[in-house]
Image (tube, rainbow, N blue to C red):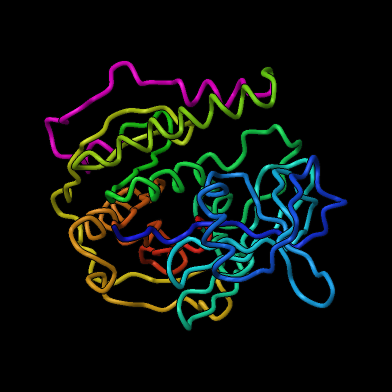
Amino acid sequence: MRRATPEISLAFLPPEPAVRPLRLAPPPLGPRALARLAPAVERPGIHLGVWRERGELVIWGTTRAIPGFCFVLEVLAPGLMVVKHRTREDSAKFQNVAVFEGEQVKFLSPESVDVADHPAVLRSLIAPEPPGSPDDPVDVLLRLAVSMRAHKRGGTLLVVPAGTEAWRESIVRPIAYAVEPPFKELADLVHSASDRGPARAQGALGRAVDAVAGLTAVDGATLITDRYELLAFGVKIGRPDGRTRVERVVLSEPIEGGDATTVALVELGGTRHISAAQFAQDQPDALALVASQDGRFTIFAWSPRDGLVHAHRVETLLL
């Protein structure tokens, strides 16, 4: 039987600052030791502690809690590694610093992407502001994107302004799975999370996010408002009569050197990407998030400054 590639997280710190570490007689850091320990540490939130001892790197044990700005290296797939760190000790979130994919190295630089003329919800996704407290349910759209990418079936999520009906002209009728009345569990959790305990709020929010993101695996697009109310899923996107067909888009990536360029839409993908870009052009106040089966993730938004749809490649933010 072919063995699966180990997926592990390495934290570079001595055992003393770690919270309730599991200590081992330190084996040397190497492929054999990592492969043997991987089945015990593949679950999210468990890190192998690595530090220097007698001039060489050793694995001293495992930990679930690490200090802020600690160097963390995650091995996700053959030839795919991500360097990240926790921005605060009281936060469960990590910020990606660099992605190593084969011989290619990408350094994250969200501030290099100008999203000033895009919807606010996109600006918070590309370059999120620090939350007011560690329990704030920030980055819900980012959580949805991560969950969409995780099911590996590909999918489209359309985000439209709440209280409007303009989006209907871009949807083919009848809608396969309309949700009436709108399903508000995720919206309610976002707005009431401050009234719950941290663990309970995050757990319930995570389950609701996964439930909505799971609907994007159904053929067609899933439709939510910018208040996270679920309106429909399995919908087909159509081009309203008289609207121009999208042929070219502005493409950028939030990495160093990821400058915006204008490319033919067909270079980005097939029907799913084409229909999402068309929706973003015809509904300039909306967003279209597209997950590809190969792991790529693109957000389409209308750019008034460029007069074109802007395609943001953001999978480096989601690893």
**Vertical position of residue 255 compared to residue 237: above or below:** below
Is residue 53 rendered to the left or right of residue 108? right
Q: Residue furthest bottom?
A: 103
**Was residue 312 drawn as part of the magenta stretch in this picture?**
no
**Was residue 183 drawn as part of the magenta stretch in this picture?**
yes
**Vertical position of residue 24 compared to residue 28: above or below:** above
- Residue at position x 86%, y 50% in the image: 17
* Nearer to us in this view, 189 or 180: 189
Q: Residue furthest front?
A: 25
**Which quadrant holds the N terminus?**
bottom left
* Nearer to us in this view, 305 or 217: 217
Q: What is the quadrant of residue 69 in the picture? A: bottom right
**Vertical position of residue 267 compared to residue 204: above or below:** below
Give the percent coordinates (x, y) of residue 159. Answer: 39, 41
Part of the protein shown in magenta? 166-194
Give the percent coordinates (x, y) of residue 144. Answer: 45, 42
* Nearer to us in this view, 316 or 2: 2
Is residue 215 rendered to the left or right of residue 69? left
Give the percent coordinates (x, y) of residue 280. Answer: 33, 53
- Residue at position x 33%, y 53% in the image: 290
**How many labels were placed on the picture?**
0
Give the percent coordinates (x, y) of residue 55. Answer: 82, 78
* Nearer to us in this view, 11 or 296: 11
- Residue at position x 26%, y 70% in the image: 265
Q: Residue furthest right?
A: 16
Q: What is the quadrant of residue 242 in the picture? A: bottom left
**Vertical position of residue 26 compared to residue 237: above or below:** below
